[in-house]
Structure formats: structure tokens, C-alpha cells
């Protein structure tokens, strides 16, 4: 069963000035956001039992597709994004090498998830 990364996340109400245009366009008083703590930085010792699969990014690739292929669960797309320090697919260019850490259980444990 997949562990949701939202299971222990609280929601905050955001009315910051930088969101004024969005708030006005939506006709609301605030925007609701998830409040995330920072992930633990991985150390070399955390990766001793991890092996890395390399994937060359091509047109049509998506993190969720890679997660489904390598972890049998598309919900873990964010692990690949976080591990590569490219949080959005728009940060990845065709030809970039994407590293996919395995086994997933060790990575999640090392991240304190």
C-alpha cells in the first residue's frame, strides 16, 4: 500500500501579498496550501544499499510514469523528482539523465518518511 506524502501534512491559509492577483481573480479571501517541512538531506551512508537506475529523459516522459515502471506505484513520482533535485517536469530537458534510486523502501526510510 502506498504511503501518501500528505498523510501528516497540515493545511494553511495563505493571503500573502504575492498572491494578490490570484486571490482577486479567484474571488476568494485566501488560498489553501499544504504546509510541508523540509525533507532530510540524504548522506552517502544513507545510500550504501541503494542502486541507481539511469534514465535518459525523452519526449513524453513523466515522473509518474517512471515511478509506475520502477516502483509499481505512480504515487511515488515525487521521490524521483526530489532525488534529482528537479521538482517539476519542466525542469527536465530532453536528453537529461534522471537517476532512479532503488529500493524505494530504503530511500523513504532515509528521508524519514
Image: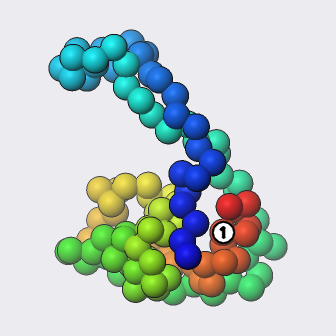
In-image side of 99 versus 24 (left or right): right
**Residue 94, x across and y down, in percent:** 26, 71
Name the quarter where the N terminus is drawn.
bottom right
Q: Is residue 74 above or below residue 72?
A: above
Residue at the front extreme, as displayed? 1
**Residue 43, image quadrant:** bottom right
**Residue 103, x across and y down, in percent:** 63, 84
| Tally of numbered discs | 1
Q: Residue at x 54, y 51 (%)?
A: 6
Q: Residue at x 42, y 30 (%)?
A: 32
User: Does residue 54 appear anywhere in the picture?
Assistant: no
In the depicted view, which residue is nearer to us: 21 or 92? 21
**Residue 44, image quadrant:** bottom right
Label 1 element class: helix
**Residue 18, x across and y down, in percent:** 37, 18
Pointer 1: what residue?
108
Q: Residue at x 73, y 67 (%)?
A: 110
Name the quarter where the C terminus is drawn.
bottom right
In-image side of 35 versus 64 (left or right): right
Q: Residue at x 36, y 71 (%)?
A: 64
User: Does residue 16 appear anywhere in the picture?
Assistant: yes
Amino acid at each position: 500500500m502506498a504511503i501518501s506524502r500528505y498523510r501528516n501534512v497540515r493545511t494553511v491559509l495563505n493571503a500573502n501579498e504575492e498572491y494578490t492577483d490570484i486571490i482577486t481573480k479567484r474571488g476568494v479571501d485566501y488560498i489553501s496550501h499544504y504546509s510541508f517541512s523540509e525533507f532530510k538531506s540524504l548522506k552517502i551512508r544513507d545510500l550504501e544499499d541503494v542502486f541507481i537506475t539511469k534514465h535518459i529523459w525523452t519526449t513524453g516522459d513523466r515522473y509518474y510514469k517512471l515511478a509506475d515502471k520502477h516502483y509499481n506505484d505512480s504515487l511515488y513520482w515525487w521521490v524521483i523528482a526530489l532525488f534529482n533535485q528537479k521538482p517539476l517536469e519542466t525542469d527536465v530537458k530532453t536528453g537529461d539523465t534522471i537517476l532512479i534510486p532503488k529500493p524505494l523502501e530504503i530511500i523513504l526510510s532515509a528521508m524519514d518518511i
